[in-house]
Image (spheres, rainbow, N blue to C red):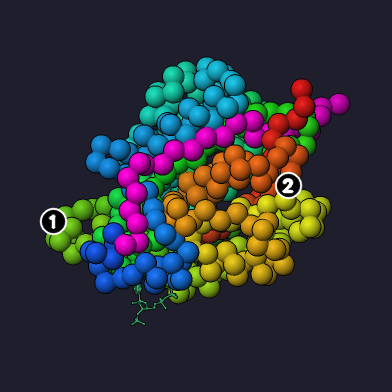
Amino acid sequence: MSRERYAAVIGWGMAVPSRVITNDELAQRIDTSDEWIRTRTGIRERRVASPGESTSTFATAAGREALAMAGVDATTIDTVIVATCTPDRPFPATACTVQANLNIPRATAFDLAAACSGFVYGLTVATSLIKSGVSRRLLLIGADIFTHYINWDDRNTCVLFGDGAGAVVLEATDQPFGLIASNLSADGNLEDLMAVDAGGTRMPLTAELLAEGRQYVYMNGREIFKHAVREMSDSAMQVVQAAGLTIDDIALVIPHQANVRIIDAVARRLEIPPERVMINLDRYGNTSAASIPIALYEAAQQGRIGSGDYVLVTAFGGGLTWGSGVVRWGRPAQ
Ligand code: ACO
Protein backbone atom coordinates (compact mmCIF):
# COMPACT_ATOMS: atom_id res chain seq x y z
CA MET A 1 0.00 0.00 0.00
CA SER A 2 1.49 3.39 -0.95
CA ARG A 3 1.88 5.78 1.96
CA GLU A 4 0.80 9.43 1.78
CA ARG A 5 3.56 11.88 0.87
CA TYR A 6 4.11 15.25 2.53
CA ALA A 7 6.61 18.07 1.93
CA ALA A 8 8.42 19.03 5.15
CA VAL A 9 10.18 22.39 5.56
CA ILE A 10 13.76 21.35 6.38
CA GLY A 11 15.66 24.64 5.93
CA TRP A 12 15.07 28.37 5.64
CA GLY A 13 17.01 31.50 4.71
CA MET A 14 16.57 35.20 4.01
CA ALA A 15 18.47 38.10 2.48
CA VAL A 16 17.75 41.83 2.35
CA PRO A 17 19.69 44.77 0.94
CA SER A 18 22.01 46.57 3.36
CA ARG A 19 20.68 50.01 2.40
CA VAL A 20 18.07 51.21 4.95
CA ILE A 21 15.66 54.05 4.15
CA THR A 22 13.90 55.45 7.22
CA ASN A 23 10.61 57.32 7.29
CA ASP A 24 12.47 60.49 8.22
CA GLU A 25 14.64 60.14 5.12
CA LEU A 26 11.50 59.90 2.94
CA ALA A 27 10.02 62.92 4.71
CA GLN A 28 13.00 64.98 3.57
CA ARG A 29 12.04 64.27 -0.05
CA ILE A 30 8.22 64.21 -0.12
CA ASP A 31 5.31 65.68 1.82
CA THR A 32 4.96 62.98 4.50
CA SER A 33 6.08 62.33 8.07
CA ASP A 34 7.34 59.48 10.24
CA GLU A 35 4.19 59.90 12.33
CA TRP A 36 1.83 59.53 9.32
CA ILE A 37 3.62 56.47 7.98
CA ARG A 38 3.86 54.75 11.37
CA THR A 39 0.26 55.32 12.38
CA ARG A 40 -1.24 54.48 8.95
CA THR A 41 0.99 51.50 8.11
CA GLY A 42 3.21 50.45 11.05
CA ILE A 43 6.34 50.83 8.89
CA ARG A 44 9.43 52.56 10.34
CA GLU A 45 12.03 51.72 7.71
CA ARG A 46 12.57 49.54 4.66
CA ARG A 47 15.51 47.93 2.82
CA VAL A 48 16.15 49.12 -0.72
CA ALA A 49 18.30 47.46 -3.38
CA SER A 50 21.24 49.43 -4.76
CA PRO A 51 22.24 49.66 -8.44
CA GLY A 52 23.84 46.38 -9.46
CA GLU A 53 21.64 44.33 -7.10
CA SER A 54 18.82 42.39 -8.79
CA THR A 55 16.12 39.99 -7.61
CA SER A 56 18.45 37.00 -8.16
CA THR A 57 21.06 38.61 -5.86
CA PHE A 58 18.83 38.23 -2.82
CA ALA A 59 17.06 35.07 -4.03
CA THR A 60 20.45 33.37 -4.39
CA ALA A 61 21.66 34.47 -0.94
CA ALA A 62 18.42 33.37 0.74
CA GLY A 63 18.51 30.05 -1.12
CA ARG A 64 22.13 29.44 -0.14
CA GLU A 65 21.33 29.96 3.54
CA ALA A 66 18.27 27.68 3.36
CA LEU A 67 20.36 24.89 1.79
CA ALA A 68 23.05 25.29 4.45
CA MET A 69 20.51 25.16 7.26
CA ALA A 70 18.87 22.08 5.74
CA GLY A 71 22.33 20.51 5.55
CA VAL A 72 21.71 19.27 2.02
CA ASP A 73 23.94 19.40 -0.99
CA ALA A 74 22.78 21.69 -3.81
CA THR A 75 23.19 18.80 -6.25
CA THR A 76 20.27 17.00 -4.56
CA ILE A 77 17.74 19.76 -5.31
CA ASP A 78 15.54 18.74 -8.24
CA THR A 79 13.30 21.84 -8.52
CA VAL A 80 13.81 25.60 -8.06
CA ILE A 81 10.79 27.89 -7.91
CA VAL A 82 11.12 31.66 -7.55
CA ALA A 83 7.88 33.45 -6.69
CA THR A 84 8.34 36.98 -7.99
CA CYS A 85 6.64 39.70 -9.98
CA THR A 86 9.90 41.62 -10.37
CA PRO A 87 12.16 39.16 -12.22
CA ASP A 88 15.71 40.06 -13.25
CA ARG A 89 14.60 40.07 -16.91
CA PRO A 90 11.34 39.29 -18.78
CA PHE A 91 13.02 35.99 -19.62
CA PRO A 92 14.73 33.70 -18.87
CA ALA A 93 13.19 32.93 -15.49
CA THR A 94 15.04 34.28 -12.46
CA ALA A 95 14.84 30.71 -11.11
CA CYS A 96 17.29 29.67 -13.87
CA THR A 97 19.77 32.34 -12.73
CA VAL A 98 19.43 31.18 -9.12
CA GLN A 99 19.88 27.55 -10.18
CA ALA A 100 23.12 28.44 -11.96
CA ASN A 101 24.35 30.66 -9.10
CA LEU A 102 23.83 27.85 -6.58
CA ASN A 103 25.34 25.15 -8.83
CA ILE A 104 22.15 23.08 -8.81
CA PRO A 105 22.58 20.86 -11.86
CA ARG A 106 19.74 20.28 -14.33
CA ALA A 107 16.90 20.97 -11.91
CA THR A 108 13.45 22.05 -13.05
CA ALA A 109 13.45 25.85 -12.68
CA PHE A 110 10.63 28.33 -13.15
CA ASP A 111 9.16 31.59 -11.84
CA LEU A 112 5.67 31.98 -10.43
CA ALA A 113 3.89 35.34 -10.61
CA ALA A 114 1.16 36.00 -8.04
CA ALA A 115 2.42 39.34 -6.65
CA CYS A 116 2.34 39.42 -2.84
CA SER A 117 0.54 36.05 -2.71
CA GLY A 118 3.43 34.43 -4.60
CA PHE A 119 4.94 32.53 -1.69
CA VAL A 120 1.62 31.03 -0.57
CA TYR A 121 0.84 30.08 -4.18
CA GLY A 122 4.37 28.68 -4.46
CA LEU A 123 4.01 26.61 -1.31
CA THR A 124 0.91 24.93 -2.74
CA VAL A 125 2.50 24.29 -6.15
CA ALA A 126 5.73 23.02 -4.57
CA THR A 127 3.91 20.72 -2.17
CA SER A 128 1.80 19.35 -5.04
CA LEU A 129 4.96 18.57 -7.03
CA ILE A 130 6.37 16.65 -4.08
CA LYS A 131 3.10 14.87 -3.26
CA SER A 132 2.75 13.72 -6.88
CA GLY A 133 6.29 12.34 -6.93
CA VAL A 134 7.54 14.80 -9.56
CA SER A 135 9.96 16.34 -7.02
CA ARG A 136 11.75 14.98 -3.96
CA ARG A 137 13.69 17.97 -2.67
CA LEU A 138 12.80 21.49 -3.75
CA LEU A 139 13.97 25.05 -3.21
CA LEU A 140 11.14 27.61 -3.01
CA ILE A 141 12.06 31.29 -2.87
CA GLY A 142 9.90 34.42 -2.59
CA ALA A 143 11.87 37.41 -3.88
CA ASP A 144 11.00 40.89 -5.07
CA ILE A 145 12.62 44.23 -5.72
CA PHE A 146 9.37 46.12 -5.69
CA THR A 147 11.13 49.46 -5.30
CA HIS A 148 12.17 49.08 -8.95
CA TYR A 149 8.59 50.05 -9.83
CA ILE A 150 8.30 52.84 -7.28
CA ASN A 151 7.99 56.51 -8.11
CA TRP A 152 9.87 58.02 -5.16
CA ASP A 153 7.84 61.22 -5.61
CA ASP A 154 4.50 59.41 -5.13
CA ARG A 155 3.75 59.45 -1.41
CA ASN A 156 0.78 57.11 -1.88
CA THR A 157 3.06 54.19 -2.77
CA CYS A 158 6.72 54.93 -2.03
CA VAL A 159 6.36 54.70 1.74
CA LEU A 160 4.94 51.16 1.60
CA PHE A 161 7.44 48.89 -0.11
CA GLY A 162 10.86 47.33 0.51
CA ASP A 163 13.06 44.67 -1.11
CA GLY A 164 14.29 41.22 -0.11
CA ALA A 165 14.02 37.45 -0.41
CA GLY A 166 13.13 34.47 1.75
CA ALA A 167 13.61 30.78 0.96
CA VAL A 168 12.64 27.34 2.20
CA VAL A 169 13.83 23.84 1.31
CA LEU A 170 11.03 21.27 1.11
CA GLU A 171 11.64 17.53 1.24
CA ALA A 172 9.41 14.51 0.70
CA THR A 173 8.43 12.62 3.83
CA ASP A 174 5.71 10.18 4.87
CA GLN A 175 5.21 12.05 8.15
CA PRO A 176 2.48 14.75 8.30
CA PHE A 177 4.73 17.82 8.12
CA GLY A 178 4.75 20.86 5.84
CA LEU A 179 1.68 22.28 4.12
CA ILE A 180 -1.28 20.22 5.27
CA ALA A 181 -4.10 22.40 3.86
CA SER A 182 -4.31 25.41 1.57
CA ASN A 183 -6.66 27.45 -0.56
CA LEU A 184 -5.84 29.91 -3.33
CA SER A 185 -8.05 32.40 -5.17
CA ALA A 186 -7.91 35.28 -7.59
CA ASP A 187 -10.29 37.86 -9.02
CA GLY A 188 -8.97 39.25 -12.28
CA ASN A 189 -11.94 41.63 -12.49
CA LEU A 190 -10.09 43.65 -9.86
CA GLU A 191 -6.76 43.66 -11.72
CA ASP A 192 -6.71 47.44 -12.05
CA LEU A 193 -6.85 48.10 -8.31
CA MET A 194 -3.10 47.75 -8.35
CA ALA A 195 -0.82 47.43 -11.36
CA VAL A 196 2.17 48.53 -13.38
CA ASP A 197 0.77 49.38 -16.83
CA ALA A 198 3.76 49.91 -19.08
CA GLY A 199 6.65 47.61 -19.90
CA GLY A 200 4.73 44.45 -20.80
CA THR A 201 3.37 43.31 -24.16
CA ARG A 202 0.08 45.20 -23.75
CA MET A 203 1.83 48.53 -23.44
CA PRO A 204 5.49 48.34 -24.52
CA LEU A 205 7.71 51.06 -23.11
CA THR A 206 8.09 54.24 -25.12
CA ALA A 207 9.76 57.53 -24.29
CA GLU A 208 6.28 59.10 -23.92
CA LEU A 209 5.08 56.45 -21.46
CA LEU A 210 8.28 56.80 -19.45
CA ALA A 211 7.79 60.57 -19.32
CA GLU A 212 4.21 59.99 -18.06
CA GLY A 213 5.50 57.64 -15.34
CA ARG A 214 3.46 54.67 -16.59
CA GLN A 215 6.31 52.29 -15.61
CA TYR A 216 5.48 52.83 -11.94
CA VAL A 217 3.08 50.99 -9.66
CA TYR A 218 -0.25 52.62 -8.88
CA MET A 219 -2.94 51.38 -6.55
CA ASN A 220 -6.24 52.14 -4.93
CA GLY A 221 -5.08 51.69 -1.34
CA ARG A 222 -8.49 52.04 0.31
CA GLU A 223 -10.18 49.43 -1.90
CA ILE A 224 -7.28 46.99 -1.57
CA PHE A 225 -7.40 47.44 2.19
CA LYS A 226 -11.04 46.33 2.33
CA HIS A 227 -10.57 43.32 0.06
CA ALA A 228 -7.41 42.29 1.90
CA VAL A 229 -9.08 42.16 5.31
CA ARG A 230 -12.09 40.22 4.05
CA GLU A 231 -10.31 37.73 1.79
CA MET A 232 -7.39 37.00 4.10
CA SER A 233 -9.58 36.37 7.13
CA ASP A 234 -12.17 34.30 5.21
CA SER A 235 -9.56 32.13 3.51
CA ALA A 236 -7.62 31.75 6.78
CA MET A 237 -10.71 30.56 8.63
CA GLN A 238 -11.55 28.10 5.83
CA VAL A 239 -8.05 26.63 5.72
CA VAL A 240 -7.87 26.08 9.48
CA GLN A 241 -11.13 24.18 9.25
CA ALA A 242 -9.92 22.21 6.22
CA ALA A 243 -6.85 21.18 8.22
CA GLY A 244 -9.17 19.76 10.89
CA LEU A 245 -7.94 22.33 13.44
CA THR A 246 -9.27 25.30 15.37
CA ILE A 247 -7.61 28.69 15.74
CA ASP A 248 -6.45 27.60 19.23
CA ASP A 249 -4.21 24.99 17.59
CA ILE A 250 -2.32 27.66 15.63
CA ALA A 251 1.00 28.58 17.28
CA LEU A 252 1.56 31.65 15.10
CA VAL A 253 -0.16 33.46 12.24
CA ILE A 254 2.24 34.76 9.59
CA PRO A 255 0.27 37.26 7.52
CA HIS A 256 1.57 39.06 4.45
CA GLN A 257 3.26 42.16 5.82
CA ALA A 258 1.48 45.01 4.00
CA ASN A 259 -0.01 47.19 6.70
CA VAL A 260 -0.28 46.67 10.46
CA ARG A 261 -3.89 47.87 10.41
CA ILE A 262 -4.81 45.15 7.89
CA ILE A 263 -3.04 42.56 10.08
CA ASP A 264 -4.79 43.79 13.24
CA ALA A 265 -8.19 43.66 11.53
CA VAL A 266 -7.54 40.10 10.26
CA ALA A 267 -6.39 39.01 13.75
CA ARG A 268 -9.57 40.46 15.30
CA ARG A 269 -11.73 38.57 12.82
CA LEU A 270 -9.83 35.35 13.53
CA GLU A 271 -10.12 36.04 17.26
CA ILE A 272 -6.43 35.35 17.77
CA PRO A 273 -4.45 37.40 20.32
CA PRO A 274 -1.70 39.76 19.06
CA GLU A 275 1.08 37.72 20.67
CA ARG A 276 0.28 34.88 18.24
CA VAL A 277 0.57 37.13 15.17
CA MET A 278 3.96 37.78 13.54
CA ILE A 279 4.74 41.39 12.62
CA ASN A 280 8.08 42.55 11.23
CA LEU A 281 6.93 45.09 8.65
CA ASP A 282 8.19 47.89 10.88
CA ARG A 283 11.72 47.03 9.65
CA TYR A 284 11.05 45.88 6.09
CA GLY A 285 7.82 47.41 4.77
CA ASN A 286 5.92 45.33 2.22
CA THR A 287 8.44 43.05 0.49
CA SER A 288 5.78 41.44 -1.73
CA ALA A 289 6.45 37.69 -2.30
CA ALA A 290 9.35 37.82 0.17
CA SER A 291 7.29 39.03 3.12
CA ILE A 292 5.98 35.67 4.39
CA PRO A 293 9.23 33.67 4.05
CA ILE A 294 11.19 36.51 5.72
CA ALA A 295 8.65 36.57 8.57
CA LEU A 296 8.76 32.75 8.82
CA TYR A 297 12.55 32.92 9.02
CA GLU A 298 12.54 35.51 11.78
CA ALA A 299 9.80 33.70 13.72
CA ALA A 300 11.86 30.49 13.62
CA GLN A 301 15.10 32.29 14.58
CA GLN A 302 13.33 33.96 17.50
CA GLY A 303 11.98 30.61 18.71
CA ARG A 304 8.37 31.68 18.15
CA ILE A 305 7.76 28.54 16.10
CA GLY A 306 9.30 25.14 16.67
CA SER A 307 9.19 21.70 15.10
CA GLY A 308 5.66 20.30 15.05
CA ASP A 309 3.95 23.67 15.54
CA TYR A 310 1.05 24.64 13.29
CA VAL A 311 1.64 27.92 11.46
CA LEU A 312 -1.05 29.76 9.53
CA VAL A 313 0.15 31.76 6.51
CA THR A 314 -2.21 34.13 4.73
CA ALA A 315 -1.58 36.56 1.88
CA PHE A 316 -3.18 38.87 -0.66
CA GLY A 317 -1.79 40.89 -3.51
CA GLY A 318 -2.16 42.36 -6.97
CA GLY A 319 -4.34 40.37 -9.33
CA LEU A 320 -6.15 40.41 -7.03
CA THR A 321 -4.76 37.17 -5.64
CA TRP A 322 -5.05 35.71 -2.17
CA GLY A 323 -4.72 32.47 -0.28
CA SER A 324 -3.88 30.78 3.01
CA GLY A 325 -2.15 27.67 4.22
CA VAL A 326 -1.59 25.68 7.40
CA VAL A 327 2.00 24.47 7.72
CA ARG A 328 3.22 21.96 10.27
CA TRP A 329 6.64 23.44 10.83
CA GLY A 330 9.98 21.67 10.87
CA ARG A 331 11.26 18.23 9.94
CA PRO A 332 10.17 14.85 11.26
CA ALA A 333 12.52 13.07 13.68
CA GLN A 334 14.84 10.78 11.70
N1 ACO B 1 2.04 60.84 3.84
C1 ACO B 1 1.12 61.74 4.17
N2 ACO B 1 -0.13 61.72 3.65
C2 ACO B 1 -0.43 60.75 2.77
C3 ACO B 1 0.51 59.77 2.38
C4 ACO B 1 1.79 59.84 2.95
N3 ACO B 1 2.75 58.95 2.67
N4 ACO B 1 -0.08 58.93 1.51
C5 ACO B 1 -1.35 59.35 1.34
N5 ACO B 1 -1.55 60.47 2.10
C6 ACO B 1 -2.78 61.25 2.23
C7 ACO B 1 -3.72 61.04 1.08
O1 ACO B 1 -3.36 61.89 0.02
C8 ACO B 1 -5.05 61.41 1.70
O2 ACO B 1 -5.18 62.79 1.67
P1 ACO B 1 -6.59 63.47 1.27
O3 ACO B 1 -7.56 62.96 2.29
O4 ACO B 1 -6.29 64.93 1.37
O5 ACO B 1 -6.87 62.98 -0.11
C9 ACO B 1 -4.89 61.01 3.16
O6 ACO B 1 -3.48 60.82 3.38
C10 ACO B 1 -5.61 59.74 3.58
O7 ACO B 1 -5.50 58.78 2.57
P2 ACO B 1 -6.21 57.38 2.69
O8 ACO B 1 -6.10 56.69 1.39
O9 ACO B 1 -7.55 57.52 3.32
O10 ACO B 1 -5.31 56.66 3.78
P3 ACO B 1 -5.50 55.24 4.35
O11 ACO B 1 -5.78 55.33 5.81
O12 ACO B 1 -6.39 54.36 3.52
O13 ACO B 1 -4.01 54.65 4.22
C11 ACO B 1 -2.75 53.20 2.78
C12 ACO B 1 -3.45 54.56 2.94
C13 ACO B 1 -1.64 53.13 3.83
C14 ACO B 1 -2.18 53.09 1.38
C15 ACO B 1 -3.78 52.07 3.06
O14 ACO B 1 -4.95 52.29 2.33
C16 ACO B 1 -3.24 50.70 2.72
O15 ACO B 1 -2.29 50.20 3.31
N6 ACO B 1 -3.88 49.99 1.76
C17 ACO B 1 -3.42 48.68 1.34
C18 ACO B 1 -2.41 48.86 0.27
C19 ACO B 1 -1.57 47.65 0.08
O16 ACO B 1 -1.31 46.90 1.00
N7 ACO B 1 -1.11 47.44 -1.14
C20 ACO B 1 -0.23 46.38 -1.44
C21 ACO B 1 -0.97 45.26 -2.05
S1 ACO B 1 0.02 43.84 -2.00
C22 ACO B 1 0.84 43.61 -3.50
O17 ACO B 1 0.33 43.01 -4.40
C23 ACO B 1 2.21 44.20 -3.67
Numbered disc in front, either 2 or 1: 2
Residue at (72, 60) in percent of width and height: 238
Judge by depth and name the residue closer to the eye, 207 or 41. Answer: 41
Q: Is residue 271 above or below residue 184?
A: below
- Residue 207's x, y, as percent? 13, 56
Q: Which residue is mark 1?
A: 207
Residue at (44, 19) in percent of width and height: 103
Say whether residue 4 is magenta: yes
Q: Quadrant of the N terminus?
A: top right
| Quadrant of residue 245 within the rendered picture | bottom right
Residue at (34, 57) in percent of width and height: 22
- Label 1, ligand 1: CB separation under 8 Å: no
- Label 2, ligand 1: CB separation under 8 Å: no
Which image quadrant shows ligand 1? bottom left
- Residue 302's x, y, as percent? 61, 43
Given the image, on which type of amino acid does mark 2 rest?
Tyr
Q: Secondary structure at mark 2?
A: strand
Q: Which comes sooner in the sequence, label 2 or label 1?
A: 1
Residue lying farthest to the right in this orientation: 1
Give the magenta part as a residue range. Answer: 1-24
Q: Which residue is mark 2?
A: 310
- Residue 51's x, y, as percent? 24, 41
Q: Is residue 128 visible?
A: no
Residue 234 left/right relative to 15? right
